[in-house]
Structure formats: structure tokens, C-alpha cells
Image: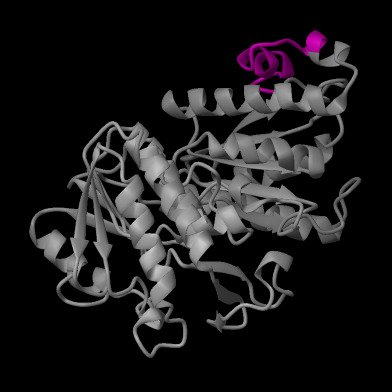
Amino acid sequence: MTPDKTILVAGTYDTKDDELHYLSDVIRAQGGKVLSMDVSVLGDPSQPTDVSKHDVAEAGGSSIQQAIDSGDENTAMQIMARGSAAKALELYRAGQIDGVIVLGGTMGTDLALDLCAALPIGVPKYVVSTVSFSPLIPPERLPADVQMILWAGGLYGLNSICQASLSQAAGAVLGAARAVEPPKRERPLIGMTSFGKTVLRYMVALKPALEERGFEVAVFHATGMGGRAFESLAAEGAFAAVFDFAPQEVSNHLFGGLSAGADRMTNAGQAGIPQLVAPGCYDLVDYVGWQEAPAALQGREAHAHNRLLTSAMLNAEERRSVASTICNKLSVAQAPVAFLLPEQGCNEWDRPGGPLHDADGLKAFADEVTTKCPANVKLNIMDCHINDPAFR
């Protein structure tokens, strides 16, 4: 079989030499190529890697000796994390790699998240980790399209249990590199945020209408990870415009819900991308439905969307805080911004007579937006509900 795609295999070769070579052997046996990267600090691999630990440290603006002299494993691995991320991006831009697989425990996983986050969406990224899916990993550290598999039974040395995980991951990253269709960018791309049609419906009409005008439309599910993907693409300047109609992740970040990170609702503005903004579901905070509600959200009216997700209502003062925060984020935008404010409600459950209707809370939010709306933002007050045809 003629070798085709090249996979970057990264890890600490001083402690996981056998496992990393096993991954490489599986990839080669399937007809792929391997480019190896050592992110060790103290020890050396059994044979030279394509990218040495010295190369990695230098790419991070430091050296292996400085990492050793720090006397702290966390400081040392952060040097290697910076370097591995920079080196991986350099290799990708040079056309030398088509995907990446990183192996590690907690130290290696911490590094792997930075390395994978440096690569654009569409580049296959696999992490084989002893802490995959663990609550140790905050959502905002997860790259938008990363794949993870638990490195079961793999803390020290090869065995048939961990080889099952390693071989799956090796085959998966090579298969993904062969099958992936990277974003083509043939039409101007609009990024839109939303939730499902039970609570927000504008995308049903807007998407085909925008496509008829020559745009491609990507709708992001704003439940934390969707917002991370949206923001990462905005930071790359991938969008011609954004329709950020579901900024609930701002509320989540403020009040302990499913955060998409502190930079939510900032990257499009910083990248000079025009924005249409509306406050879909601003009044709710999403939390993990199968867990006890966070202390700050207990005793409130809430909607159990399913067994995974519950949404709790914010009070009037908290809604003012959300409005002020959104206005502050939009105030630094480097391109035109229009704020669409539907006065009759911003999610299906808050209509008059609905289970989460709060007229006073809605008025508090609207008053704060009207008062705090920055000069660079065009405010459009609309006498309708966000799900009405008039909004679209």
C-alpha cells in the first residue's frame, strides 16, 4: 500500500516509548506515514524522533535546560506545551502533517489540549488519555473538534487492554485524515448561534433564505462546546458575518452554567467581522440536569429540557448584569454591530402564559440594553417575539 497521509505522533518518549512506537507501527501498517514529536524533559527516547524535545522547547521560546532548571514539572511541561502547539501548527502550515495523535496521562493531556487547540477545525485531532472524559478537563480547554479515547489499563507499559485503545485511536486518526473534507470556503460563511426548534426557531427560515443569496450558513448549538467552536472560527476570521442570536453562554459564564469561556461574544468583534446580535435565551442558565443545581441556582423556576440539561431562570437584577456584560463586549467591536431586541420575549417558554414568562425581568433587561448600548452598536427595538415571523 502506498503511504498517503502523515500523522504527527506526540508524547513523552522518555516514559512512553513503547506505547508511542506501537501507535506509529499501527499507523504504518495501515499505509500511513508518521512524523514523531518528543515532548519529554528529563529523559531521551530509545531512538531519535523527527522533532526532538530541544526543537519543541525552542519553539516555545525556551530550552530544555531552562525547563529542567525551573525545578517544577508544571512549569516545565507548560514550556513544552507552548512549544508543541507552535511546532504542530508550523508543521501543518508547511503541509507536513495531515492529523495528530497525542498520548498522555494528566501531564500529557494538559499539553495535548494546547497542541490540538493550535490546529484549525477540520484537522483530525486525537487524544489518548488516562483521563479522557474526566471532570478534570474543563470544557473551555477542549478544541472544538477534538476526539478522545480512554487509555484503559495504560498507565505503565503495553498490554492487551491498552493496545485495544491505542490501535483504535491509530486507525481512527489515519482514517479521519483520509476521509476528512476540510472547509472549502467557496462561499462567504455566516456563523449563527441557536438552540433546537422547541425554544428558538429563526434559523428554519433564515438558513435557506441566506443560502439563496449565495451564503453558506453554519448553525452552532450554544451549549458550551458549540460556542467554543463558534468563537474559534470567529477568531480565525472564518466568517463573513455572524448572526449571534443565542448568547446564553454569556449568562452561563456569569452564573455558573455551561460556559463557552470568558471570550464568548468577543472574537468576531476583534476580528472585524460584522455582527447581528439578538438575546435568544439570555434569561436562562443551563446546567447539568443529572446533577444537583449549583447553589446559586437552587429554588428557581427551571425547565428540564431532558435528562442531560436543565435551564434555570435569572431574576431581574441578574438580567441587567447580562445586558451590561453583552453591551461591554460589543463596545470594542472593530466592525458594524446591530442589536435586535424583541420586546415580547426571547425564547419560546417566556411568552405570556408560558412556564418561564417574566414580564418584569424582560423589561429590566430591555431597559438596561437601551441605557448601556454603546455608540458603535445600532439598536433595533422590535415589537415582536424572537420566534415570530416579524423577527425574521
Report x, y in % for residue 213.
8, 57
The total number of labels drawn is 0
Q: Is residue 52 magenta?
A: yes
Confirm whether residue 97 shows in the render.
yes
At x 44%, y 42%, the residue is 232
249 sits left or right of 39 in the view: left
Identify which residue is drawn at 87% across, 20% down.
Answer: 42
Residue 198 shows up from this direction:
no
Which span of residues is magenta-colored? 49-66
Expressed as whole percent of the image width and height from the top left, the position of residue 13 reads: 79, 30
Residue 55: quadrant of the picture: top right
The foreground one among 183 and 28 is 183
Quadrant hosting residue 114: top right
Q: Is residue 379 above or below residue 49?
A: below
Q: Is residue 251 above or below residue 189?
A: below
From the viewer's perspective, tell me whether residue 145 is left or right of residue 241.
right
Image point 56% across, 23% down: which residue?
86
Find residue 297 and report its horizontal and vertical position in percent: 65, 69
Check the image and tell me how it is coloured.
one colour
- Residue 177 within the segment the image draws in magenta: no
Asked which quadrant contains residue 185, the reply is top left
Task: Please report the residue visible at 78 percent of the width from the left and 54 percent of the height from the top.
Answer: 151
Q: Which image quadrant: the C terminus?
A: bottom left
Q: Is residue 185 above or below residue 172?
A: above
| Residue at the extreme left | 213
